[in-house]
Image: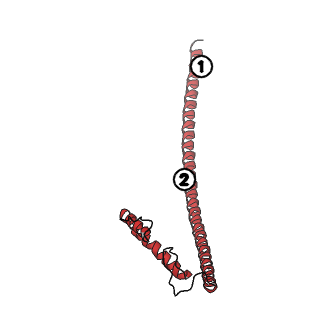
Amino acid sequence: MSSTNPSETPNSDADAAESVDRKRPLGGFITELGRWGRGLASRVLGSPLDQGAAVDADSPAPDTPPQRESALKRMRVLHDVAETLRGAADGFIAAKLDEFEARVDLKLDQIEERIDRKTLELHQQLRELRDRELRHRLRMLKITLIFTVLVAALSLAYKWLSGVIRP
């Protein structure tokens, strides 16, 4: 009886991935996406990426100079495309950040304008309240002055009458 070790079987990674797939809902999708990416890279590079994949006896070895040069050219093209895409992505991100910054600046300007308007309104209300308070105090001073003058006049009239009546 020979027991098989999962690491010795050629599909042990696939079996492990399938067991993980059952545990996670997106596991199958992620595994399939990884397989698709490896297959695409294998086709672009012209050699299989899987270590367990067998090379046909009819096909030349992957280390032959023409295939290696072809693979290097493909890698350079892929690298150039990746750099171009990276540059385009960086440009897009920079443009979006500039647009976001412009929107934020616009909103901050609008908020600042509203704050300035409210500040002016509050200053106007405080000015009106101060003016009302001053008018009220002036009115009270006038009334106090009038009553003081009346009391002084009555006091003078009393003194004059008391000096006229007693002689």
Q: Residue at x 56, y 86 (%)?
A: 60
Q: Is residue 111 above or below residue 26?
A: above
- Which residue lies most toward the bottom here? 58
**Which amino acid is tagged 2?**
Lys
Residue 41 visible, this orientation:
yes
Percent across and percent down for residue 139 are 55, 37
Nearer-the-camera pick, 30 or 4: 4
Q: Residue at x 60, y 15 (%)?
A: 163
Percent across and percent down for residue 10 are 44, 71
To which quarter of the image does residue 61 belong?
bottom right
Judged left or right of residue 72, residue 11 is left
Residue 25 visible, this orientation:
no
- The residue beneath circle 1 is 160
Q: Is residue 63 above or below residue 148?
A: below
Q: Secondary structure at mark 2?
A: helix
Name the image quarter holding the C terminus. top right
- The residue beneath circle 2 is 118
Q: Is residue 165 above or below residue 14?
A: above
Percent across and percent down for residue 19 are 38, 65
Name the image quarter holding the N terminus. bottom left
